[in-house]
Image: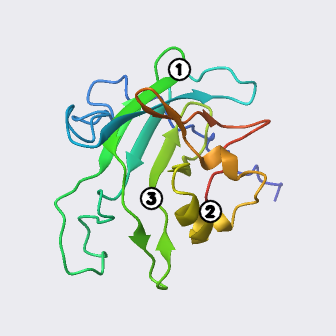
Amino acid sequence: MGASTPPATTPSQTVGPFYALPGGILWADGPEVVADGTPGSFLLRGRLLDGNGDPIPDGVLEIWQADAQGRFDHPDDPRPESSSWQGFGRCPTDTDGGFWFRTVKPGPLPTPTGETEAPHINVTVLARGMLNRVVTRVYFPDEERANAADPVLSAVDPARRGTLLATPDDQGYRFDIRIQGDDETVFFAI
């Protein structure tokens, strides 16, 4: 009996771009987590960049976050008060890698171990050329005390924590995401 040829492997697939297809993954509310004019609302804007600093024009970013009181509308939230807060947005990047979300600053969150997480926004990034999504967080620079006590941020190398801090600007905050290379944004395994 001769040697058999091993079966061919399935080629790896990348995540995206899916949103340009009819019925793609765009979210009906898009980047508007809250309506324009909502008290305390601001724009979170930035650019999605590759390892060379070039824009990624066909990415998709998703955010999810707690409401201003630090609550989620989720059965795993252990607090008895409920929230109708959805806290989700999705935005494709433009030709310059730009994205934006209109939202409100989330409140601090309790952890299952009794600690408190600083106000933050969770971000998922999907783009052509990536085999898996990546997940990061946006923290706020004016929450110094909460950031210092945050168990997730505290676990990040101090030299890299700056990649997780938004920068105030005239419309809210700026948060650029770099997928690779120098100043790569910190991503989390979830």
| Kind of element beneath mark 2 | helix
> Quick check: 159 left or right of 14?
right
Q: Which residue is disc 1 drawn over?
A: 57
Which residue ends up furthest to the bottom in the rendered image?
113
For residue 22, what is the image quadrant? top left
Left or right of 63? Residue 53 is right
9 lies above or below 73: above
* Residue furthest to the right: 2
Query: In the image, what residue type sits under mark 3?
Result: Pro
Gap between marks 1 and 3, in whole Å?
Answer: 29 Å
Q: State whether residue 175 appears in this view.
A: yes
Question: Mark 1 belongs to which amino acid?
Answer: Pro
- Front residue of 29 and 15: 29
Marks 1,3: beta carbons within 8 A: no
Residue 153 marker: 2
Q: In the picture provided, is 127 more to the left or to the right than 181?
A: left
Are there few (<14), some (14-19), or many (20+) residues within 10 Å of tag 2? some
Q: Which residue is mark 3?
A: 119
Q: Residue at coordinates 61% horizontally, 21% vertically from top-left?
A: 55
- Indicate the amino acid at tag 2: Leu
> Which of the 4 image quarters holds residue 107?
bottom left
Q: Secondary structure at mark 1?
A: loop
Q: Earlier in the sequence, mark 1 or mark 2?
A: 1
In the rendered image, residue 182, in percent from the top left (x then y), is placed at 80, 36
Check the picture and name the quadrant holding the N terminus: bottom right
